[in-house]
Image (cartoon, rainbow, N blue to C red):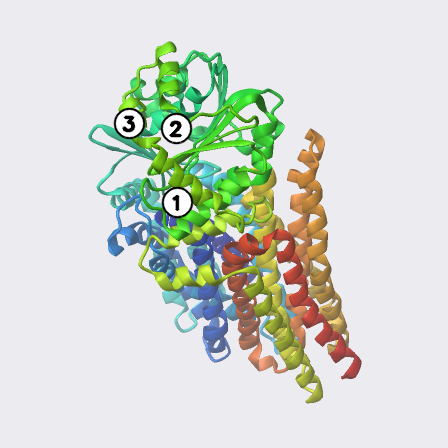
Amino acid sequence: MNRRLIFSITAIGIAVMASQIVLMRELLIVFYGNELSIAFILASWLAGGAIGSAVLGVLSDRIIARVRFFGACQIALAAILPLIVTASRSIRAFMGFNAGEIVPIMPIAAASFFLLLPLCAVFGFLFSLASRIYKPEPVLGAVRIGQVYVLEAIGAIAGGLITSFVFIRFLNSIQIMAVLSLLLAASALLVAMPYGKNKGMPVVRAIALIALLANTVMWLCGGWAAVEKYSLEKAWHPNKIVASKNSIYSNIVLTRRPGQFSFFENGLHLYAIPDRQFAEEAVHFALLEHLAPQKVLLIGGGVGGLLGEIARHPVGKIDYAELDPTIVEMARQYLPLDYSGGISDERVSIIYEDGRRFVKEAREKYDVIIVSLGDPYTAQINRFYTAEFFAEARRILKSDGILSFGLTSSESFVGTDLANLLRSIYATLGTAFADIKIIPGETAYFLASPGRGMLTYDYKILMKRARLRGVELKYVREYYLFSRMSQEIISYMESLLRASGSMRINLDFRPISYYYGLIAWASKFRDSNFTNILKSVNEKAIWSFAAIIYMAILAAGFIGIAKKKLFRAAAIVSVVANGFSQMTFQVLVLLAFQAIYGYMFYKIGIITTAFMAGIALGGWTIVKALPNIDHRVGRRILVLLQGGLCVYPFILIAMLNYFAATTGKYVSWAGANMAFIALPIISGFLGGAIFPVAGKIYLRDESKRGRTAGLAYGADLFGSCAGAVLAGIILVPVLGIMKTCAAVAAVNLSILLVLIAGVVFL
């Protein structure tokens, strides 16, 4: 029986991690795809798990037919998994939003929570139930909780690896969920097998067998492929889907309406084809400002018509950096030749690499660099508007070179929230470039050159250059530029942007423009409460709130010491802080990796799996020794582990600073493939070790093993939920990575001081 349970618990870990990856990707497509939506989706996942574990976990000690209930829950999950993907794709239409339309904050939070709650609550409850039925004899309860924790972590490692390297490459989302459904149904059947004709068990076996057979029939008759096609058509209605492909980087969808194609990446509209006005503005403002451009670097947007516009100039070489080959492949396969002709121009070299990474390592000098990535509403895009990127771009520009990019704006009036975003980027751009011009409009185009006097607002000069080069333009013409570049409009925009003295510089490790971008994004909706919350956050407010938390922990701790009641409560508080710290560390590592190397989505599965490997290793190490650890020794071990959480943030700071500042092929390889794998293993080890030790300290009554397991697991998930929301949305953008590390260290230090005092005085 125990072997079957080991398989079953491991299978649940596989299902948890794999379904989380799939549903995160699916909901990112539904909800626009920025980190704010990621935070709410992940928080909803963790909150649902916490509710299932902490609230429903109480029932695991009261249920008599626990094994039968365990099998029934697995069958329920097997049924839920394929359905939840189709439900997630229908939720946008249910809420009344069209494909590609931005969804407000509160609908994202509410929809994520209610959609994921049934699934995650069952997952969380199964942890408590498994802790109760795995070796149910009333001894060594803390060891059994720890063993279940490790087994689930091992399953999560397998699930992360299989999903990242196999499933996503070869299966669609519905098919992945169908495979997980097969696994859980088989697991339920195995768990029910040894019980013969025990009450209810034949029913569990029969339903599990029916689920297996039905799933198999769906595979054989192409049913899952049909469900995938139908759900995608519903999700993208009224657009007609030409193609939808998952790559290791993202989900790319190409849709078609009469006379127009559109590309979407993770649900975010990239560009429509043809859109000649956009293509002309993005290209010709920059190229006509240069006297004689010969070498051009384009970052993004090439498939959207920009390559074709650049090719109309007598340039000698065009380098096009595009991270995801899927976009180019789909353009070549599905777009008419006159829409994608620029891709085939003999002067074009397509570089399948992150544009930021390419700029950092490039040795050539360019006349013009055009960045066509849109507003910094995601941390991934924000990397192209930081002081570090602007310095790197200046390094590879010739002395008369030009950098160009466009941001959402307005011709007549720019609101405060959008103005703060534009000012922040303008101030940051000024750290690297001496000459900056802005062409106002619904999209404001920023033009920057290292030397003064290279740029002009005289549209007559620009038109003369166009005629000399034989470039016939439809939109970027005299009558259009006369209005677009009028002195009145330019003066308004420049005065607006130059009021940036109080604006903080946007940095890789302190992405403040991303924070302003979130506010500008949120302010588009009527949800003023959430917008006001974001606006009220500043560094002083964060440190003041943190100080209150520190003092509350210390005060509660010393009251507990005075009353001789400390360690049981302190153990749970330590688990909450551990969950918060681990999730924050994960966010910091992922964002830092993205800032330094630029392909986080490719490595996210590996980094997350490394973290789970650390959890499994830490949990296994402690669980192995736990039978010989009494409560006094357990308290001392908890003190040491809590001290590790205080030290780790400073190790993280040192490592991140080193790899951000150091260049070179071998150092870069070591950082991406060794250091950034080791860092989550170390933090995961600490987290995995704290959980069973805290369980040992808290568990006093073996009859309440399930309740204790649920409470501890729920506390861990609750802390992780807080970390998911706070780290990516508030702490990192406002404080930066380094100060966020210090803040997390301070939280853990306050708990450490209480634990040390408890060891000394109790």
Q: CA distance from mark 3 to mark 2?
A: 15 Å
**Label 3 close to label 2 by CB (< 8 Å):** no
Residue 214, compared with residue 355, is above or below; it is below
Name the residue that disc number 1 marks.
173
Q: Is residue 317 visible?
A: yes
Q: CA distance from mark 1 to mark 3?
A: 47 Å
**Label 1 close to label 2 by CB (< 8 Å):** no
Q: Nearer the viewer, residue 343 or 566?
A: 343
**Label 1 close to label 3 by CB (< 8 Å):** no
**For the residue marked with disc 3, what is the amino acid?**
Tyr
Q: Nearer the viewer, residue 45 or 144?
A: 45
| Image quarter (top left, top right, bottom left or bottom right) of the C terminus | bottom right
| Residue 734 % position (x, y) | 55, 55
Q: Nearer the viewer, residue 64 or 619?
A: 619
**For the residue marked with disc 1, what is the amino acid?**
Ser
| Residue 277 % position (x, y) | 30, 28
